[in-house]
Amino acid sequence: MKIAVIGQSLFGQEVYKELRKDGHTIVGVFTIPDKDGKADPLATEAEKDGVPVFKFPRWRVKSQAIPEVVSQYRDMGAELNVLPFCSQFIPMEVIDHPKHGSIIYHPSLLPRHRGASAINWTLIHGDKKAGFTVFWADDGLDTGPILLQKECDVEPNDTVNTIYKRFLFPEGVKGTVEAVRLIAEGKAPKITQPQEGATYEGIQKKEGAKIDWNQSAEALHNWIRGNDKVPGAWAEVDGRKVTFYGSILVDNGTTASGQPLEISGASRPGIVTKAGLVLFGNDDKALLVKNLQFDGKMIAAAQYFRSGSSAAVELTEEEKTFAEQMRAVWKSILSNVSQIEDSTDFFKSGAASMDVVRLVEEVKLRASSCQLQNEDVYMNTTFQDFIQMCVRKLRGEDDEEELVVDYVEKTINNMTIKIPHQLFINGEFVDAEGGKTYKTINPTDGTAICDVSLAQISDVDKAVAAAKEAFEEGEWGKMNPRDRGRLIYKAAPSLSTRPGLIGTSLSPRRNQ
């Protein structure tokens, strides 16, 4: 078929590429104007293939189609319009023009969550199922007949980013191409959307993302993850606007140890811990956020009370070469910036979330041992901070805290022995609840060596909760049962030659 692609972004780019692979002729690509001198990825891909690209800033004026724009579109002779990700209002003169009409990808299970922030509201409402719809465009807002739908489970700690990357993007591309295939074969259904269950929520913006603390922990968690990363759920902390990212529900919040943090409107203070910031709902249940953003910079929540960053490291010649390679990468991404200075800010210079993904991959290509996460870029936005972070990772200096141990020193057989005497819970040595201790006896002469912390029931509860969280956050906890079985099967033959290992070393808790 002859297809006009009307859309933008990486999603539009991938749909465009797959339609061409399927043998369709793309007669024209209609996308947004260049931003800060940078073309949209869909435009870049089409221009590379020699496909006509149109970058209309608008299609309508005062709700009326612009005749010149409509005329240029009609000259392309499209038989079908595909709108994979379109942020512009397209007039009905264009929507209805092709003989097969127009189809649109929408990231929700219509008729639920009509509107521009569908993924956000799926998570904010705590839906257990998410998905996408490819529907036939009509003159309503996401109200046209359904052509195709696919759904997935919403995982407990999904964010807008994770569910999009895991399902809505890859499966959405496949689903849109499949819908076009059904149209070409004359098998595409037109199922009228039911009115039952229909909802519409407006576009989610920063001013509307302020956190209402008079809710349960689960509702707070859904609000934060539903606004993560855009527009970002926020609250007033220490007189400034702080945005919260990376929320997970926890079941040991009441036992969290750390420094209290007063939050305006919250029923009780949060707790800054080594794992992040623990927050509480009005039901006294807890959630944990990993990252915070304020004053234009993102930090790990665990670092909130710490003083400024450590001293800058001096780069070796090899590291200087890496830095210059990355300077060239930044220049290629920030094409509107004449020169990349140490003070150049990645996002203030026009970078978007898709550029973060590209930057992370570019680092991996040049230094495979430097495995970055998207958050590393968000927390090191200037070129100098970014290079310092990369170099520290390459050196194995991940800025981890030194373990604090209160030793008891004893001189035995002319040797000084340092003996830890506290409980080790959640990565740190702590006294038992109530300071309870018992005496350790030297078996050779019956003398007391030192007082050792005696674990109480509450200490055991804390240790079990910490171990459970570490297990679920670790690699073993992230594996599905089939992959765990494969790992055990691969390990078993070698372990079977060493008596006493099977049944112990394969314990997931040991492996963590």
Image (spheres, grey):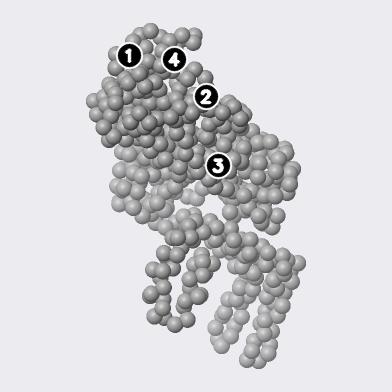
Question: Element type at marker 2?
Answer: loop
Q: Of marks 4 and 1, which one's residue comes earlier in the chain? A: 1
Alpha carbon distance from label 2 to label 4 = 14 Å
In this rendering, the label closer to the viewer, 2 or 1:
2
Which residue is at a point 40% across and 30% down the rendered structure image?
188
Are the residues tagged 2 and 3 within 8 Å (C-beta)? no
Query: Which residue is labeled 1 in the image?
Result: 74
Q: Of marks 4 and 3, which one's residue comes earlier in the chain? A: 4
Q: Position of residue 288 (x, y in %)?
A: 61, 49
Q: Of marks 2 and 1, which one's residue comes earlier in the chain? A: 1
Which residue is at a point 51% across and 47% down the rendered structure image?
309
Query: Which residue is labeled 2 in the image?
Result: 143
Are the residues tagged 4 and 1 within 8 Å (C-beta)? no
Q: Of marks 2 and 4, which one's residue comes earlier in the chain? A: 4
Query: Which residue is labeled 3 in the image?
Result: 129
Are the residues tagged 2 and 4 within 8 Å (C-beta)? no
- Which kind of residue does numbered mark 4 sit on? Met
